[in-house]
């Protein structure tokens, strides 16, 4: 039903968003846990850095990532020294950029969920002989589950929806970095409105259904917890 | 052997706790005082939920905190019951009880879970989630959960404070049963003297972060100057044993060093140890023994001290031959009767309540 190039773009987008979501949950959880529990004076600056992608134009973020990962940038130097070449205009580079770009959408729901648990139940677990690690896995994680669902859905959807950062860091290489949003842009540039519409309607439908399911889930989770 | 020695200096802006206490290895010690006196803070310091900048804490020979030692909460063999129960909302009652039990080695399991479930009367609740329990049931499960880890020390932080009067009456009997069947020291934080006189053997009175008094509850309750009760609710406790019952008039007589008291028929065995409370406002004083009075309990006594209480009243401390009693009378009567320490009088007691 889709043109081959469009199908490639869809599959690539799904692959990118999946990898990024998994990485974000792994990276975002410890950051969220730290932010929810720390009284350090470093909390506000770290929160600000995590939230930056929400307010920055994607081109600004993309620009600095491009410079950092480029042959003369600090990240580029390291990846070259490791024999990995440079990351811009590769799938890996796109993953790295997307992780930064979608970080706040994953960290914030998890952080809020951890904060809502409060110290009381964790203290109770401590008096029942649970070590800090044990308390995290048996009390904090299960109780923060709705936060994780929200985080995963938003992280995935936000990665699917990005455009500016992809264009800056990933360019437009078929099968490598040409995701759906970029492909739509290409079609419009080439005045292939029918093709553009085919992908645009898919994104539209996906986004609506995702958000609808998320809000429905959150409603149920809130009702269950009261 | 299992005495608890605690010395803490712990300060926040506007509040400082400075205590040095030795708590007995057996029985219930009530930590008593007004809100903000540091009761909960002391309990949290003992549990290791907070860390005092300066402190020494030892249970028996085992040091839990010292200059360079701090045993984390999860390694201290204690049970803790919070004011707000704090059951895990994602686990049913059974798994709440199992949570701590699974985390102690089999070798240190001295309390059987079945026994605990039976003691707290929660057998029918095992499959329920905490949000399907009443406040009283939640608190009973919390107590059972704390006991399931076979603690060597049980800490209770106002377990009844969040409950309404009816729920309190529901949980109190379980706490009393606990007292009789536990062999470990219990620290019980409370600001309600009515609970304390029913449950405690020892009393530690805190005021503004300092120890105002400590000792046996019977001894401290007889000290008028401590003002342990709000308003005019002070009253002495008397440890007595049941001497006999009068079935005709449905009365019970209890005996103690220095006399006997008669009260409405109690469902107790002859010889059983009981604790009765005599409120000071229910005691009046006469110089000669009255006849032709409806008051049954009249005991010879000697005045030991007179403490002013408000503008018009005094609390008179009496000695009934080894047992202390308090009487609240007007200052005018003190002068009219010429009461002063050493004077022999008769105490007329209008009301006696069995509290234990």
Image: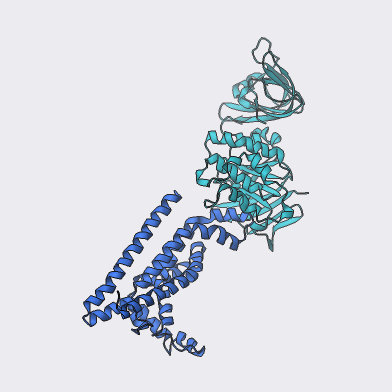
Give residue B88's position: percent from left, percent from top.
55, 51
Give residue A152's position: percent from left, percent from top.
43, 66
User: Which of the two residues, B87 or B179, is positioned nearer the viewer here?
Assistant: B87
Give residue B306's position: percent from left, percent from top.
66, 29
Chain colored blue:
A
Q: Chain B rendered in what hue?
A: cyan
Who's the residue at 46% across and 86% down the image?
Answer: A74
Who's the residue at 58% across and 35% down the image?
Answer: B170
Residue B111 placement, left or right of B123 = right
**Location of residue A179 with respect to B166 vertically, above or below:** below
Numbered marks: total:
0
Which color scheme did the rendering employ for the protein? by chain
Can the viewer see residue A126 in this picture? yes
Who's the residue at 44% across and 74% down the image?
Answer: A19
Furthest residue to the top?
A: B292
Furthest residue to the right?
A: B1
Give residue B89's position: percent from left, percent from top.
52, 51
Residue B131 placement, left or right of B269 = left
């Amino acid at each position: 039903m889709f043109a081959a190039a469009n199908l490639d773009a869809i599959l690539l987008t799904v692959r990118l968003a999946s990898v990024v979501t998994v990485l974000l949950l792994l990276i975002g959880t410890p950051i969220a846990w730290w932010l929810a529990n720390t009284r350090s004076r470093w909390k506000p600056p770290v929160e600000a850095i995590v939230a930056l992608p929400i307010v920055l134009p994607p081109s600004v973020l993309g620009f600095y990532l491009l410079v950092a990962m480029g042959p003369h940038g600090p990240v580029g130097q390291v990846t070259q020294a490791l024999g990995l070449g440079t990351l811009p205009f590769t799938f890996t580079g796109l993953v790295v950029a997307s992780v930064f770009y979608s970080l706040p959408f994953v960290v914030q729901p998890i952080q809020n969920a951890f904060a809502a648990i409060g110290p009381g139940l964790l203290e109770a677990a401590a008096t029942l002989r649970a070590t800090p690690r044990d308390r995290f896995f048996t009390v904090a994680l299960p109780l923060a589950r709705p936060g994780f669902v929200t985080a995963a859905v938003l992280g995935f959807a936000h990665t699917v929806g990005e455009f500016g950062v992809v264009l800056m860091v990933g360019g437009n290489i078929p099968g490598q970095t040409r995701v759906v949003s970029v492909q739509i842009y290409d079609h419009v540039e080439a005045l292939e409105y029918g093709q553009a519409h085919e992908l645009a309607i898919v994104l539209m439908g996906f986004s609506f259904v995702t958000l609808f399911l998320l809000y429905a889930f959150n409603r149920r989770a809130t009702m269950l917890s009261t | 052997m299992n005495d608890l020695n605690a010395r803490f200096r712990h300060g926040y802006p506007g509040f400082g706790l400075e205590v040095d206490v030795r708590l007995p290895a057996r029985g219930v010690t009530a930590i008593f005082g007004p809100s903000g006196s540091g009761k909960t803070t002391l309990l949290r310091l003992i549990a290791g939920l907070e860390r005092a900048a300066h402190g020494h804490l030892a249970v028996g020979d085992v040091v839990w905190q010292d200059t360079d030692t701090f045993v984390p909460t999860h390694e201290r063999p204690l049970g803790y019951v919070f004011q707000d129960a704090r059951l895990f909302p994602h686990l049913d009652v059974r798994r709440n009880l199992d949570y701590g039990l699974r985390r102690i080695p089999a070798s240190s399991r001295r309390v059987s879970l079945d026994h605990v479930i039976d003691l707290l009367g929660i057998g029918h609740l095992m499959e329920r989630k905490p949000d399907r329990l009443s406040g009283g049931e939640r608190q009973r499960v919390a107590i059972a959960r704390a006991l399931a880890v076979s603690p060597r020390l049980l800490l209770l932080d106002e377990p009844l404070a969040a409950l309404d009067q009816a729920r309190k009456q529901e949980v109190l009997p379980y706490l009393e049963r606990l007292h009789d069947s536990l062999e470990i020291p219990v620290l019980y934080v409370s600001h309600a003297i009515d609970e304390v006189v029913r449950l405690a053997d020892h009393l530690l009175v805190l005021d503004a972060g300092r120890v105002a008094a400590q000792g046996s509850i019977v001894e401290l309750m007889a000290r008028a100057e401590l003002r342990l009760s709000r308003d005019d609710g002070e009253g002495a406790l008397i440890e007595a044993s049941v001497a006999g019952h009068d079935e005709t008039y449905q009365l019970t007589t209890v005996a103690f060093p220095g006399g006997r008291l008669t009260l409405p028929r109690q469902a107790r065995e002859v010889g059983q140890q009981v604790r009765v409370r005599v409120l000071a406002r229910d005691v009046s004083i006469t110089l000669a023994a009255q006849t032709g009075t409806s008051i049954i309990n009249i005991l010879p006594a000697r005045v030991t001290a007179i403490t002013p209480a408000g503008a018009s009243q005094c609390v008179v401390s009496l000695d009934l031959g080894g047992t202390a009693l308090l009487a609240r009378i007007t200052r005018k009567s003190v002068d009219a009767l010429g009461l002063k320490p050493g004077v022999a009088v008769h105490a007329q007691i209008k009301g006696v309540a069995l509290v234990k």
